[in-house]
Image (cartoon, helix red, strand yellow):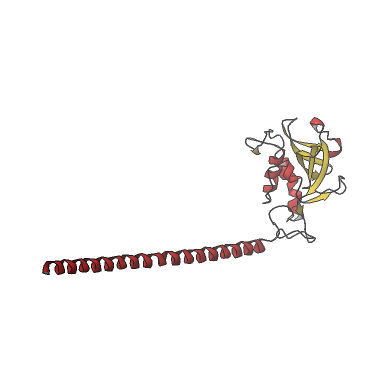
Amino acid sequence: MGKFRDSMTSRRLLLAVFLTAAASVAGAQGSSAKPKASIKAVSSKTSAANKTGLKKSTLASLADRGSNPRGPFAKVSSEQRDSLGEHARQLLGTRYKWAGANPARGLDCSGFVKYVFASLGVELPHSAKELAKLGGSITKDTADMQPGDLLVFGKGKRISHVGIYIGDGIMIHASSSNKSVVETPVDKYRPAGGLQWKGVRRVISVPSTGTDGDGPENR
């Protein structure tokens, strides 16, 4: 009988120890789960705050920059506008190269336009199609055109050629048929491949004072 009581007591002690250990493990697991949820919540709040800060920073930078001062409708002085012709003439004779954007290796029509305007700090796309969408539309009349206006040519709805008007009825462009950069009287130009003169785009603006070279378009 004494042995049976001792055995029962031992079992009860073992059961108590087991239950105590199980409770400790469960408590540890519960306490470790809470920090994870807390960390996740803090991480989400931090991420949201970062996104908000980034958004505010982006909007502020756009507001400070203005209306694309170094792209279409960039303001330049009348002297800068007229200098485009000089920059363009310096490239006469440069060999034509499809997709070319470097005079040392060759230029295509839009690469030529991009390179010339970059001399004024005005960034334009290397694509005749995209250039034909920029700026404002000008009538196809040399009396209304100004140095720096872009003449675009194409067939149907497709634009495939572009040149720069430099004044006095002259356009300079990188010609695939002539295999070089050439100057051509606008009224005598007959592009190869049956291309048609689709329009004129004005992508720079000269302020009324003629002195300010920065800021959005002077409307």
Image coordinates for residue 36, horizontal then vertical, percent = 42, 64
Residue closest to the eye, 22 or 218: 22
Q: Tell me the residue at 74%/56% (across/down).
A: 77
Image coordinates of residue 88 in percent, x first then y, are 72, 42
Residue positioned 79% across, 48% down in the render: 201
Is 155 on the left-hand or right-hand side of 47?
A: right
Above or below, comparing residue 79 to residue 178 in the picture = below
Give 215 or 136, whichever is nearer the viewer.
Answer: 136
Q: Which quarter of the rendered picture does the N terminus lie within?
A: bottom left
Q: State whether residue 178 is above or below residue 25.
A: above
Please tell me in which quadrant of the rendered image residue 52 appears: bottom right
Query: Of all residues shown, which one is farthest toward the front?
Result: 1
Q: Position of residue 31 (x, y in %)?
A: 37, 68
Count of picture labels: 0
* Residue drawn at (18%, 69%) of the image: 9
The x and y percentages for residue 96 are 69, 33
Single out the residue that lies furthest toward the left.
2
Asked if 23 appears above or below 138 in the picture, the reply is below
Left or right, residue 219 beside residue 42? right
Q: Nearer the viewer, residue 111 or 167?
A: 111
Q: Quadrant of the C terminus?
A: bottom right
Tell me if I can see residue 176 in this picture.
yes
**Residue 90 visible somewhere in the drawing:** no
User: Within the image, what quadrant is residue 53 found in?
Assistant: bottom right
Q: Nearer the viewer, residue 216 or 58?
A: 58
